[in-house]
Amino acid sequence: MAQRDHFATRLGFVLAAAGSAVGLGNIWKFPFMTGQNGGGAFLVLYIVFVLTIGLSVMLAEFAIGRAGQRNPVGSFRALKGGAWPAAGGLGVIAGFVILSFYSVVGGWTLAYAIKSVTGALASNDPKVLGAAFGTFIADPLDVIGFHTAFMVLTLVIVAGGVRHGIERAARILMPILALLVIVLAVRAVTLDGAAKGIAFFLTPDFSKVTWNTVNAALGQAFFSLSLGMGTMITYASYLNRQVNLPKTAAQVTLLDTGFAVIAGLMILPAVFAFGFDPAAGPGLTFITLPAVFAQMPAGALFSFLFFTLLAIAALTSAVSIIEPVVSYLIDERKLSRRTATWGAGAVIWALGVPSALSLGPWKDITVGGKSILDAVDYLASNIMLPLGGILIALFVGWSVAARAVDEAQSGGNHPFALARAWIFICRFVAPVAVAWVMIQGL
Ligand code: PHE
């Protein structure tokens, strides 16, 4: 077997996995999904899915990856073979789909970092900020240009082996982002008129829950925790046997959920205080936050700092979305890292162009009533990732249960008291619940 790079420390792995999980999913997607899905009840469903299915699937991915020591396809093959490697293949395809639109939104954050200092966003008037976002999104050169810039940054990091550099940078920058999100949440909840937004977010109204809400919460749980496509399999394949997997899964999950909840408190109270529309969709964070910054001393500076850090958080996630693809192409197709990265990146970039245009020049094109960007996101988050999650759970629950439990306990180094409950969830709860929700959502 070829020598594999390994994380030097447990902290290094926790930070890489958390760097993958924390990203646009928390700060861009979670608030607007909560806004579109009626608030508090969505939050409750989301947390229930995260703590049951999400946590179990994350541990399953960790166990598969560390036992398999390969990319998702290779890890399934190393542990069992048969038709199972196809489950890893589904994940590799999902990587293409997800990064295509993820990079578009990553480009928005870069653009907004720049706009923060040009004064283009200095207003708290919903109309002005809505129009600023609308104008930006309607300019094909702008959106495709920033999509390209974000993609190139991602590929340079993945191809050039500066990964360790960015992981080290993220170790310093992510706590700063966390701090900033907390400061902004404090500012948002103390705005005049914030109470309505806080109540919207924290008071569940289950009478408004439909299967769409449930389906959306499930998809968000998978997307935000980076589950169902082999990212966590790939990261865990760079891991040695000393690390306590259940503990790490719990920490990453808590960190990710904490980020999302605080992001919700940062956006939704402000949405109500300034009279924005909570159901505005993908633009919500980008039209709401500038209004908060406009209410703060040195707002332009905060704004620049925030969008820059968000872009970096998005980059550490983007790297983790393409890594399963690249490691597959290297291990299984014998490409060099450079060729694999730039080749896959070019395809993903092209796939992203329709999403980039879909809120502006192509906004009249809809797929099932959704913009192209929303439709691609839906395909990935609500179909591909849950399907991948079902397969991962079934694999661990039925096919390699004994081996997986041994792996989760690090061969006896770290006894895991909940092993039986975990296998039970992988066998029955996760596959049945996810399949049920998916079928109802169709
Ligand atoms: N979890 C990341 C985020 O919230 C996105 C992601 C999805 C990363 C799937 C890897 C795999 O931004």
Image (cartoon, helix red, strand yellow):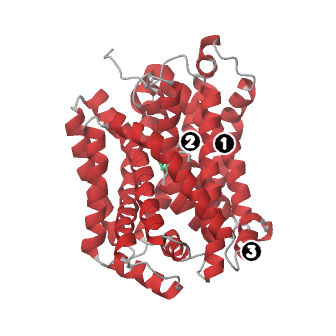
Tell me: 394 left or right of 189. Answer: left
Q: Which part of the image, by quadrant, shows the N terminus? A: top left
The one of 425 and 197 positioned closer to us in this rendering: 197
Could you tell whether 23 is left or right of 372 in the image?
right
Vertically, is 100 above or below 412? below
Q: Tell me: 11 left or right of 109.
A: right
The local secondary structure at tag 2 comes to: helix
Q: Secondary structure at mark 1?
A: helix
Say which residue appears at 64% left-offset and 18% top-offset. 409
Q: Quadrant of residue 337?
A: top left
Instruction: Check residue 204 in the rendering and tell me which mark sits there, or answer none.
Output: none
Of all residues, the one furthest to the front in this rendering is 297
Q: Residues within 10 Å of mark 2 (few under 14, many from 20)?
A: many
Label located before the other in sequence (3 or 1): 1
How many tags in the picture?
3
Q: Cβ–Cβ below 8 Å for labels 2 and 1?
A: yes
User: From the viewer's perspective, is residue 42 above or below residue 390?
Assistant: below
Q: Tag 1: Cα neighbours inside 10 Å, few (<14), some, or many (≥20)?
A: many
The answer to whether residue 361 is above or below residue 258 is: below
Disc 2 to disc 1, how far (Cα)? 9 Å
Q: Secondary structure at mark 3?
A: helix
Residue at mark 3? 195
The quadrant the C terminus occupies is: bottom right
Q: Which residue is mark 2?
A: 389
Q: Is mark 1 within 8 Å of ligand 1?
A: no
